[in-house]
Image: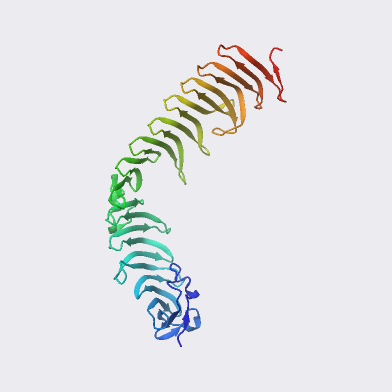
Amino acid sequence: MLHSLAFPTGLALAAACFAAPALAVQVCELNGQPVNPSNGYTTEGKTGLMRCREGEGGPVVREQELQRGKFMGVVRWFKDGALEREHHVNERGNQDGLAREWSRVEAGGKPVLVREETYRDGRNTGLARSWYPSGQLKRVAGYGDDDREQAVAEFNAQGQLAELRCATRPMLGSDFDDKAACGHTGAASTVTLYASKGQPRARVSFERGERRKSETLWDNGAVRELMEVTTAGGVERSFAVDGTKRHVVQWLTLSGERPRRITTLDQEFHESGKLVRERRWRAGERGGELVSEASWYLNGQPRERIEFVAVDGSALRRETRFHDNGKKSFEGAWRVAAAGGRSEQPTGTHQSFDAEGRLRGERIYDERGRIRRERELDERGTVLRDDEVFEDGSRKAVGR
């Protein structure tokens, strides 16, 4: 009597990359004899190709090779009687060798190869390829010894290059000339990347496998984002569809065992193209340290300026605000824990001004951030109120 089973647990490692194609009961035989892959006694010491069908007398759904009672060698999956997937496993149950997949363009049609890759003891190695059902190459990737993709070229259905990631050396062989495209010939190269419908979407420049410049494009062909990179750092700019600059980021690259990218400048622009916000950093021991912030009104006048400075060994945040006519509206400072930080502790004299730039109010703080004196003035500079402020919040007019 033939043995029937659902998906055998004993094949979990051997078929790790593929789920069971169906929940129907499978009937397996080896060299014309019934076997049960879940029962090692039925396969002990045997060599050959085990074939499993969907029910007794049904179509073949799986084939798996045994060597001296151990599942090792080829594994095949079938769908509707046609080969769908094939790979090989080693004595440890890990994929080892060539793995392939097929697909049908239409029901009942001839299966076409859509994927091919190579494994070494469960890890990708060499090249992995995939194709559109038409046979057009869709993707080719090169793997390093660490099982990680190092070089990738992707294509749209028309065969145009859609994506490119380069390695430090040519890896993609005859499938794609990454030696020339990635700038491994001694000169920098520029390639165009295309969208699925065939329109250009980006231009990318490489030098010895390193991306040095990239432009992503709007549908009208205008530059959307522009990034330029050197060994020392880089800059990234973004633009509106009409070409107006909207954002700029600059950075430094600190070399070391793990190179670090530290932002040094961040600018934002209004849709009119006017600069409205800016932040600047300097490279420090713990990364980027914020040194200044600024913002502007749309008429070009300054709106706010913040600086982070060190005075007598203390880190201060100095803040100046302006009216939209360019006249100063406020000036003051706060103590901060470290350069670039924020603090609730004011220090020194804080002054406020009217739209004509005349001093209208003043607060003086002690070393502990407590207000000690407060003055109010009119437009002629006459003191209207001058109070000494005590720790409990009570006040006393100066001179009384």
Q: Is residue 313 left or right of residue 107?
A: right
Percent position of residue 285, x then y: 52, 38
Depicted 313 relative to depicted 126: above or below? above
- The residue shown at (43%, 38%) is 251
Percent position of residue 71, x then y: 44, 76
Depicted 18 relative to depicted 219: above or below? below
Depicted 230 relative to depicted 372: above or below? below
- The residue shown at (29%, 58%) is 175
Q: Is residue 280 left or right of residue 150?
A: right
- The residue shown at (49%, 30%) is 292
Residue 93 versus residue 244: which sits nearer the camera?
Answer: 244
Q: Is residue 255 left or right of residue 377?
A: left
Percent position of residue 207, x then y: 32, 45
Percent position of residue 382, x then y: 60, 11
Q: Where, quadrant-wise, is the C terminus in this rendering?
A: top right
Residue 143 versus residue 4: which sits nearer the camera?
Answer: 4
Q: Locate residue 385: give its quadrant.
A: top right
The chosen color scheme is: rainbow
Residue 112 versus residue 165: which sits nearer the camera?
Answer: 112
Q: Locate residue 128: give its quadrant.
A: bottom left
Number of numbered discs overlaid on the protein picture? 0
